[in-house]
Amino acid sequence: MNIPNAAASGIRYTPTTARERVAEFAETITSPVPEDGFPTEAVAALTQSGLLSAPLPPDYGGCGLGLLPGTMRPLLDTLRAVGRVDLSVGRLYEGHCNALQLVAQFGTEAQFRQAALDTAAGHMFAVWNTQGARGIDLLDGDAGPVLDGEKTYCSGVGQISRPIVTVQSNREDGLRMCLLRADELPLKADASAWTPLGMAASVSGAVRLADVAVRPDDLIGAPGDYQRQPWFSGGAVRFAAVQLGGAEALLDETITHLRRTGRDGDPYQTARVGSMAVLVESGRAWLIRAAEAADLVFGLPDFDAEAATEAVHLANMTRTAIERICLDVMEHAVRSIGVAGLLRPHPLERRVRDLTTYLRQPAPDAALAAVGRHVLARGNAG
Ligand SMILES: Cc1cc2nc3c(=O)[nH]c(=O)nc-3n(C[C@H](O)[C@H](O)[C@H](O)COP(=O)(O)OP(=O)(O)OC[C@H]3O[C@@H](n4cnc5c(N)ncnc54)[C@H](O)[C@@H]3O)c2cc1C
């Protein structure tokens, strides 16, 4: 972890906690985030409330979320709370937190300081790794590195000014990370194929780079760092936290609907709401457990290999459990409200579409199989 001293940076320290920032953010979003494009106003509210800088250390105006030792629980609570407000905004915010963690973990002090200054200036970060048949090649240009190729499912494409893309050189083994100063580079954003069931506001389209020259100091870390464990698989708890926020919102909508329609006294409805509450609370328990395991590893200069393996194992179990929890909560919510909840403008309709889409995350079967392998190798229930 290379977190430099911020004394010389000139960044103003705002001594508020993550919880206060989340509360201010949630109060600002009083109506549904529009689905017809990037959620500019909600992202402005992230900046305004101090959530954008929350992952930075305190002397950079942040709360150290996910960067400093012992901050996994507040990070996951924050992601859950943002996801509860809106899943697309939660997705974008999760990418921002992930990118700042990657710069802190694998970047140089100068790169982190610049990232902190950029965050303080309102730049949002992202991580764009997913690709189709062709990714982005890292080539040797006459004047330095040159990028050529494309990435898909890039949340915030065309809007986010500081994405990290993973790139491949034919001289090196393993992906490299490159920070793109998207507002200064000739990138081609193409959201035309982003026509999803839900999560439209995450604007997760494609980006194309045709021989784009970048600065050597925009390359972050060494080849292979992006997929280095325990950070790579361990990071899955972040999206699981956002997803659980979506399930909490479904429970909120169900309670509101049943009370408004006078159906809250029915014994079947009461039992179903009880089941949903149990599911949501179990998701929170998973996140607490995953945060405990992660806190023995992430943000520490040194950790033991067993703790790292356990953090990955807990992350694999947590994402698997929370996917199931979200699917079950969704089924209960739809059964409780009925078809009225699937008709616009009922808020459930959008929440179901968003959560259904956002639950699709990479290699879910591989994550579960890794859990099985771990337990079989251990030889007991733990
Ligand atoms: C709203 C949204 C925003 C996103 N934003 C970003 C972003 O900003 N940056 C980014 O990098 N990505 C982003 N993604 C992409 C995301 O990280 C995943 O890559 C993507 O969602 C994978 O979903 P999938 O269902 O296609 O997964 P897959 O991993 O393709 O899984 C689909 C199915 O295939 C199975 N499977 C997986 N691999 C194999 C295999 N090798 N052989 C056989 N079966 C296999 C799985 O177990 C599963 O059953 C976003 C996705 C969404 C939905």
Image (cartoon, rainbow, N blue to C red):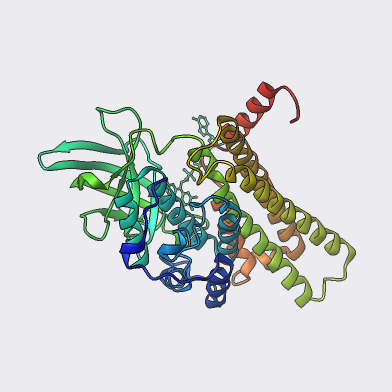
Question: x, y percentage for residue 228?
Answer: 44, 35
Q: Would you identify the image quadrant in which residue 227 lies?
A: top left
Residue situated in front as seen by the camera: 342 or 94: 94
Question: x, y percentage for residue 190?
Answer: 32, 54
Residue situated in front as seen by the camera: 359 or 144: 144
**187 lies left or right of 350:** left
Residue at the (75%, 69%) spot, across then down: 255
Question: x, y percentage for residue 69?
Answer: 54, 50
Residue 170 visible in the displayed image: yes
Residue 153 visible in the displayed image: no
Q: Which quarter of the rendering shows the N terminus?
A: top left
Please say if 51 is above or below 193: below
Please say if 265 is above or below 324: below
Residue situated in front as seen by the camera: 294 or 270: 294
Q: How many marks?
A: 0
Q: Would you identify the image quadrant in which residue 142 lies?
A: top left
Q: Residue furthest left?
A: 142
Q: Which quarter of the rendering shows the C terminus?
A: top right
Question: x, y percentage for residue 267?
Answer: 89, 64
**141 lies left or right of 86:** left
Please say if 380 is above or below 312: above
Residue situated in front as seen by the camera: 48 or 183: 48
Residue at the (53%, 72%) spot, across then down: 25
Residue at the (73%, 63%) spot, across then down: 338
Q: Residue furthest right?
A: 267
Residue at the (23%, 41%) spot, across then down: 148
